[in-house]
Amino acid sequence: MKLEGRVALVTGAARGIGRGIALALAREGADVAIADLLSDPEVAKDAESAAQAIRDVGRAVELIDCDVSDEASCDAMVTQTIERLGGLAVVVANAGIAGIGTVLDTSAAQWERVLGVNATGTFLTCRAALPRLVEAGEGVIVNVASTLGLKAVAGRASYVASKFAVVGLTKALAVEVADSGVRVNCVCPSSVRSHMTVAELMDVTGIDDASKADRVWTNVAAERLPLGRSVEPDDIGRAVVWLCESDMVTGIAVPVTGGDGL
């Protein structure tokens, strides 16, 4: 297994893309810390399900409560990961929230919330983990951005801005720490079939059944994407594993889109 004996920390890993990444890393031999808002009972339930899936492939797992928009919470998350799992080699800053609205429609509070989680949360996660990785002289950070960090669409101003920030932070940090042996990259998913995107589809369309919305999402993606199926969390997980392995790759943003935009 490619990551045998490594410890990985994944934020926002209770469900969706984060869960897919955590499982992909575990299948390659990593022990995993799942960090998420465990104070939310629904999130905690999903986190335990993800943890059991990791145990089922024979890896150690720890659940850590963390709000990535809070500096002290991020620092504690890294400390707890090291104390409970014995090290830290891979950090995936995945935690994020949706943001819908034009600039004129977006309140200052909404803007600050989306940027606080998506951009500042990524920054705080990276900054908390860096001393440990730099001290070890090796390590990998993978930030989760979006194709909307590479191109803009109307009606998603705060989200687009936050994901462009993640791409820019990734490139800046990769240059800053290259001589320490730490590599920093990001993945840029297009719309992935996940809890967040299905919930967003329900809000936009008025569909009131999650299972029906999931089927609609899958069918539309199969018709629209050149590769003929929806992008799944596991697809993002495999891209993250590749970035962990590729020791001459740093400072890049990898689109994972099913051919969207070709």
Image (tube, rainbow, N blue to C red):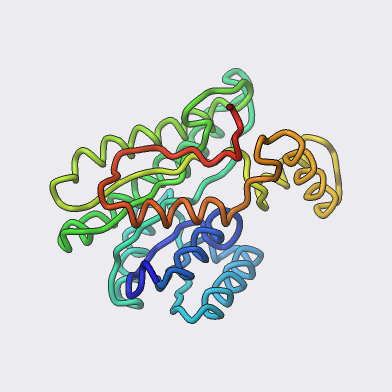
Residue 114 location (% of width, % of height): 52, 38
Rendering coords of residue 202 (x, y %):
78, 42
Q: Is residue 124 left or right of residue 12?
A: left
Q: Residue 25's x, y, as percent?
A: 45, 64
Does 69 appear above or below 82? Answer: above
Q: Is residue 112 left or right of residue 169?
A: right
Q: Where, by quadrant of the figure, is residue 221 drawn?
A: top right
- Most foreground residue, 21 or 12: 21
Image quarter where the C terminus lies is top right
Q: Could you tell me which residue is drawn at 51 percent across and 61 percent down?
A: 36
Direction top: furthest residue? 104
Question: Which corner quadrant of the image does residue 109 belong to?
Answer: top right
209 relative position to 232: left or right: right
- Residue placed most toward the observer, 113 or 18: 18
- Image point (52%, 80%), residue name: 55
Position of 214 compared to 181: left or right? right
Note whether 34 is above or below 205 in the view shown: below
Of all residues, the one furthest to the front in this rendering is 227
Q: Position of residue 204 (x, y in %)?
A: 77, 35
Quadrant of the image for the N terminus?
Answer: bottom left
Q: How many marks?
A: 0
- Above or below: residue 247 compared with residue 207: below
Residue under the image location 32 percent in, 50 percent down: 126
Q: Residue at x 59, y 26 (%)?
A: 106
